Image (cartoon, coloured by chain):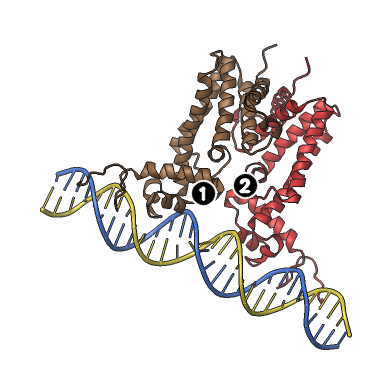
Chain colours: A brown, B red, C blue, D yellow
Amino acid sequence: MTGCMDDEAKRGYHHGDLRSALLAAAEEELAERGVEGFSLRQVARRAGVSHAAPAHHFGDAQGLLTALAADGFYRFLAAQAAREARADPDPRAQLVAAGLGYIDFALDRPALFRLLFGSDRPDFTDPALDTASTAAFFHLREQVDAAGGADVDAAAVWAMAHGLADLLGNGRLKSVLGLPQPARDEVLVAILQRAFPAAG
Amino acid sequence: MTGCMDDEAKRGYHHGDLRSALLAAAEEELAERGVEGFSLRQVARRAGVSHAAPAHHFGDAQGLLTALAADGFYRFLAAQAAREARADPDPRAQLVAAGLGYIDFALDRPALFRLLFGSDRPDFTDPALDTASTAAFFHLREQVDAAGGADVDAAAVWAMAHGLADLLGNGRLKSVLGLPQPARDEVLVAILQRAFPAAG
DNA sequence: GCCGCTATCTTGACGCTGTAAAGATTTCAC
DNA sequence: GTGAAATCTTTACAGCGTCAAGATAGCGGC
């Protein structure tokens, strides 16, 4: 019981792993209050730490949201990968599966989705965030290439998936949102396929 | 020069037409600072009035943003109408033209677009705002009906237009955004048409 | 023509926010 | 063991939204 920190006992000073604790608290706050209601002091409070503690690890609120966004893009990719894993290995099917994962992510974590695609608060010139978001874009680009598509196809596929995700995440498109699960996916698949029609 | 108020001289009390002056100031503030940087006191300052003056006309910040959003939906419809007016009267061409107007709006007023489709700050249960946003949805629905489309088609067309608008408005889809004007429209038209493929 | 009423706007105050500066405490290098 | 650095707290300040109270203007009744 010297300087060693067991388990989760947060001693007065030197939390131990405050950086990731703050990130976790920030994610919960984001989910509960949304991007527009996000408060740095509230995050600190939730992590059981003084209001100025985050500054040392993230600089300011933008820094924290930037780190959160970078992390979010990898989760975003994970959501797509989850759908791809249980889909047909055919390139076109993989592309559609990625679109479904795109939509899953927007429905599961609407606030995080909005942070990634509809907010100015993160610093998108930050190297770590840029790397993460570029990775997401490259993934799409590779899938389109594998399916023999061009620039236009990439734009169309991205726009269609993004439009569905954003509208559904904001509670619109009720004619689709009201459908029970198996039927909803069928409709979404049919719509996603329109973005990249079979050649001819 | 009794109680009559000429022109734009804002006397001490009783501005004359403060409500619309505040709306105009709010729109400028929104365009400059974005939804996330929007400040009620800043709007009051810009309108040359005390920080609590907006309260009497709009209640609170949400009230002002709600009124701004309602107005925004009519401008949104106007942007679509402008494109429709100089397009072929054929229902499908009108549908595509509306999509182009959708995108025009997002590019011309990105902050207002975000207020309408990517913010929780307006009160979307407000009757005036609900009427305005419903009008926008009905317009789309009517166009799809005129072109002989069903629920799925409406969802697909809306999602495609929205996805393009949102991504372009956020500076993504650079392969499209970088195109000179005539070529860009051609690409957008080609993509929009994919959402509602010709029967057969 | 004057009086009171009401709508409109201002002033002042409160608790919240983010951020900066300075102080306290712990760990680490040597 | 001691100085230096890293980590966290405390304190302070300006800006924010909102509420309550006060000031000023226009308007109807007489």
Where residue C1 appears, as percent x and y from the top left, is: 85, 88
- The quarter of the picture where residue B8 lies is bottom right
Where residue B22 appears, as percent x and y from the top left, is: 70, 59
The one nearer the camera, A113 or B75, is A113
Under mark 1, the amino acid is Phe
Q: Chain of mark 1?
A: A
Q: Which secondary structure lies at badge 2?
A: loop
Under mark 2, the amino acid is Asp
Where residue A192 appears, as percent x and y from the top left, is: 65, 23
Q: Is residue A26 left or right of residue A200?
A: left
Q: Is residue B62 left or right of residue D16?
A: right
Q: Is residue D3 left or right of residue D11?
A: left
How packed is label 2: few (under 14 Cα within 10 Å), some, or many (20 or more)? some
How packed is label 1: few (under 14 Cα within 10 Å), some, or many (20 or more)? some
Q: CA distance from mark 1 to mark 2?
A: 12 Å
Q: Which secondary structure lies at badge 1?
A: loop
Q: Report if the CB atoms under discs 1 and 2 are less than 8 Å apart.
A: no
Where residue A188 appears, as percent x and y from the top left, is: 65, 25
Q: Which residue is mark 2?
A: B120
Q: Chain of mark 2?
A: B
Residue found at x 82% / y 31%: B87
Task: Give the position of the N terminus of chain B as an image quadrant.
Answer: bottom right
**Vertical position of residue B7 compared to residue D2: above or below:** below
Name the mark on residue A47: none
Residue found at x 61% / y 32%: A165
Residue found at x 67% / y 66%: B53
The one nearer the camera, B69 or B187, is B69
Is residue B164 shown to the viewer in this render? no
Name the mark on residue A38: 1
Residue found at x 65% / y 46%: B115
